Every structure is written in C-alpha cells, then in structure tokens.
Image (tube, grey):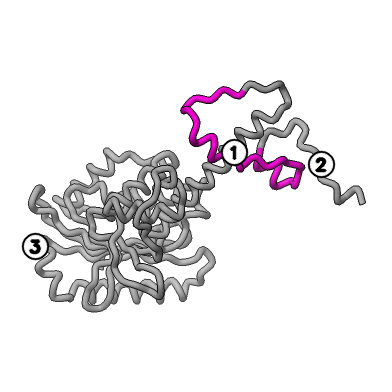
C-alpha cells in the first residue's frame, strides 16, 4: 500500500524531475497568465523551502515547451515545404507565443502563402526561394553552436567551386561537418535532414541561387546551383543529388541506389530547361551517398 503513495519533493527544485518521478506537486500553472500581465521585473519574497526555485523551474519548462513546439513547426515546414493549418483573422498580441497561432503569424509576415485546400484546412507553403533561405538561416542558427565549421573557409571553397570548378573540397568539408555533429547525430540523421543541413550551408554561397527540389523532366533534383551572374562571374553550375542509406544497409542496396542516382542526374541534366538555367556555364552532375551520418561516396557523373 505504501508503494502507491507519492513522495514529497523535499529539496527537489527541478520541475521535470518532479513530473518524471511522480512526486507531489501543487499545480500553479493557472497563475502564469496573471504573471504575463505584470511588470517585466518581479521579486519573489518568500522564506526558504517555500518553492520559489521549483516555481521558476516550472516556468522554464513551460516556456521551453512552447519554444520547442514552434521549432517543431518550423522544422516541419522546412522539411516538407508546406504545412496544413488555419489562419486566424486576428488575435491579441499576448497569444503570439502560442504554437497554434504561430502558423498565422508566419502567414501574416509573408513566410507562408496559401497554396491550396485539403478538407477544411489550408495548405500553407513557402512562397519563394528567398523566403526559403530565411527558413534555412534559422537552421544555421541552430547548427552554429553545435558544429566546428569555419564559414569564412567554406566561402573560400565556394569561390573555388564557382570559378575553378573545384567542387570536391567544399562538399567534402560540409559532409565532414555533418558527420561530426555527434551530439545531435541521432536527431538529424536521415535524407531530409541531410538535405536541410546542406541547404542551410549552401545558402551561404553568394555565387549561386540555390534551388532545392527543382522540377526536371524525370523528377526533382535535390539541388540545382544556378549561377548568380548578375553579381558574380561563376563559370560552373551544379546539379547535386544526395542519397541516404541506413547504417546497416547491405552493399547490394548501396550499389543499386548508387546506380539509380547516377541515372537520375543524367536524366535531370538532359531536361530542356537546363540549357537555359546554366547560362553558358559548365554543368557538373554530382552524387553524394551517405551511410548513416557519414558520406561514403562522392563522384561526378
């Protein structure tokens, strides 16, 4: 019978631990809306062991959850290029922090546009490539604290890629940095996440307009690096195809995927619109195959 009795959280000031260990807790979340209407600076005058630290910890967990929900929405939009939702006609400023209002906020800021209707919900998508780059700047801000990558050096490698056609050092440098993200490796692994990582860092390349998933005659290529000849005299353009294998995938599966990728990029390059898009530059067709988080093969077709 004693096993069913909750323990008192004596000396425990971490709200997450209280919840995970199923300790006694007097819910005070109903006071959060009142606190949000108060002055910016609040002083909690209470005796020791009155629960001040635990209350602050509860607030931290609450607002981190909101922030996590917003980040989750952004990642879904980045990965899928669209999201299902509704747009509120109006809402008070205090509700801007609510995740369910975040999609409406993105719409009114021009970060999403209505692309269709599915059932009773709107299909909201990224309106253009310039806005897409802003989303990937968000990804960059998340990667920067976790990654040992010199953006100055990467930009130098991009210059060699554009002017000399020396593409391997830049792509290998990004692939190595992706593989070194050991602290979040399990979270970022997968084809869509590899594409997100590459798009985030390719967006630093001033020599190209990076077009992800550009429609070609035989499907959608992962990236087309369109020469930005308005500002820079790039001599080379690129079709980049990224492929992902699970760590334990057999060699036969890897070879089959590689052969299919090689045929894919040949088909993309043969599309009639490519001639106009490359604007007289030399076109390179690159395939990079990842096994788990590690780039295993990287070749030009």
Residue farthest along the right direction in this orientation:
1
| Dot 2 crowding, Cα within 10 Å, few <14, some 14–19, many 20+ | few
Q: Position of residue 230 (x, y in %)?
A: 8, 51
Look at mark 1 in the image and give the residue it sits on: 31
Q: Report whether 294 appears left or right of 135.
A: right
Marks 1 and 3, the one that precedes in the sequence:
1
Residue at x-position 13% and y-position 65%: 277
Residue 27 colored in magenta in the image: yes
Q: Quadrant of residue 224?
A: bottom left
Image quadrant in which you'd find residue 23: top right
The residue depicted at 86 percent of the width and 51 percent of the height is 4
Label 2 belongs to which residue?
7
Q: CA distance from mark 2 to mark 1?
A: 24 Å
Residue 169 visible, this angle:
no
Which circle's residue, 2 or 3, is located before the other in the chain?
A: 2
Report whether 250 appears left or right of 237.
right
Q: Is residue 137 above or below residue 239?
A: above
Can you give x and y, in whole percent of width and height, for residue 256 in the image?
40, 76
Q: Callout 2: helix, strand or loop?
A: loop
The magenta stretch spans residue 9: no
Q: Which residue is mark 3?
A: 279
- Residue 293, image x and y in percent? 46, 56
Looking at the picture, tell me which residue is in the foreground, 291 or 43: 43
Closer to viewer: mark 2 or mark 1:
1
Magenta highlight range? 15-44
């Amino acid at each position: 019978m004693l096993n069913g009795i909750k323990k008192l959280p004596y000396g425990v000031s971490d709200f997450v631990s209280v919840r995970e260990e199923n300790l006694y807790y007097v819910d005070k979340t109903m006071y959060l809306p009142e606190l949000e209407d108060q002055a910016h600076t609040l002083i909690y005058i209470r005796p020791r062991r009155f629960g001040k630290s635990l209350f602050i910890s509860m607030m931290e967990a609450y607002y981190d959850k909101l922030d996590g929900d917003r980040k989750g929405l952004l990642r879904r939009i980045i990965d899928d290029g669209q999201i299902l939702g509704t747009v509120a006609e109006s809402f008070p400023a205090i509700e801007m922090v609510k995740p369910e209002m975040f999609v409406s906020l993105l719409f009114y800021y021009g970060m999403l546009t209505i692309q269709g209707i599915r059932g009773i919900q709107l299909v909201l998508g990224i309106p253009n490539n310039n806005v897409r780059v802003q989303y990937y700047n968000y990804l960059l801000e998340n990667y920067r604290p976790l990654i040992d990558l010199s953006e100055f050096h990467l930009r130098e490698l991009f210059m060699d890629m554009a002017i000399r056609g020396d593409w391997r050092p830049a792509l290998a440098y990004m692939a190595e940095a992706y593989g070194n993200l050991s602290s979040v490796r399990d979270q970022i692994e997968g084809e869509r996440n590899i594409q997100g990582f590459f798009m985030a860092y390719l967006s630093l390349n001033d020599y190209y307009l990076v077009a992800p998933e550009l429609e070609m005659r035989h499907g959608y290529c992962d990236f087309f690096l369109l020469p930005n000849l308005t500002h820079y005299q790039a001599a080379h353009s690129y079709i980049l195809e990224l492929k992902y294998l699970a760590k334990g995938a057999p060699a036969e599966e890897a070879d089959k995927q590689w052969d299919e990728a090689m045929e894919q990029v040949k088909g993309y390059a043969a599309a009639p619109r490519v001639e106009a898009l490359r604007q007289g530059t030399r076109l390179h067709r690159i395939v990079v195959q990842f096994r788990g988080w590690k780039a295993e093969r990287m070749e030009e077709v």
